[in-house]
Each structure stands twice: as C-alpha cells, then as structure tokens.
Image: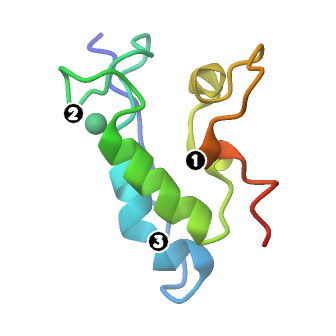
Amino acid sequence: MDGTRGVVAVVVAADSPTGRVATAIDDLTAHLPAAGQQSSCSVCSARSWPCPLFHDAAHRVIAAGLRLADLVPVDLHPRLWPPAATQQPRWFSEETSNG
Ligand SMILES: [Zn+2]
C-alpha cells in the first residue's frame, strides 16, 4: 500500500458553480496528503499540510460558493477544523463570509 488516495471523475456542466472551479478542485485534490499521512502534502512533500497550493485552491473553491468540507476526505477534517480550536482560521470561516 502506498497510501495513494482514490479519486473519481465527475461530469458537471461547465457553467455550474462546480464546473467553473473544476481546475481549483483538481488542484485541491492533487494537494491532499496521502492516506495515513495527514501532516504532509503528497505533492509538495517537504511542506506541511495544508500547503500553500492547497490554501490557494481552497480559497477559489470557497469563493465560488462551494463547501470545502464536501471536497476533503473526512479523515482530514480535524486537521482543517481542529475540534478544540478557540480561534477560527480566517479562510475556513465559510459561514461568516456571506457579505
Ligand atoms: Zn501541496
């Protein structure tokens, strides 16, 4: 087992919210850690995760109105949204950015 995550291809309308950020979703998925290695990006192997390229892709996904949590494997959610976090990371506060 090399820990590589499985992926699926989905067909969506190009002018749908998801279709408009398909490249960002590809980038986001490419920069997920390998299964069982939640602390390092599988592409930017020397960097800790979330890596800058994941951040960038996540920003684009959130800006398009999509839910980041729906695109990230559940085992990685605690890393992005720590249960004991007393302060919210700026870029994950999807609920509060409805301005
Ligand atoms: Zn990366």
Query: Which amino acid does the dot numbered 3 rest on?
Result: Val
Query: Which amino acid does the dot numbered 1 rest on?
Result: Leu
Q: Is mark 1 within 8 Å of ligand 1?
A: no
Q: Between 81 and 8, which is closer to the camera in this rendering?
A: 81
Identify the residue at horizontal 49%, vertical 72% (top origin).
11
Q: Position of residue 73 (x, y in %)?
A: 57, 32
- Say what secondary structure mark 2 lies in: loop
Q: Position of residue 35 (x, y in %)?
A: 42, 18
Q: Between 85 and 76, which is closer to the camera in this rendering?
A: 85
Q: Which residue is mark 3?
A: 21
Q: Position of residue 62 (x, y in %)?
A: 60, 61
- Is residue 30 at least partly visible in the picture? no
* Residue that protrudes farthest toward the front in the picture: 87
- Vertical relation: 86 (above or below) 90: above
Left or right of 28? Residue 59 is right
Q: How packed is label 2: few (under 14 Cα within 10 Å), some, or many (20 or more)?
A: some
How far, Cα to Cα, is label 2 from label 1?
18 Å
Q: Which mark is residue 71?
A: 1
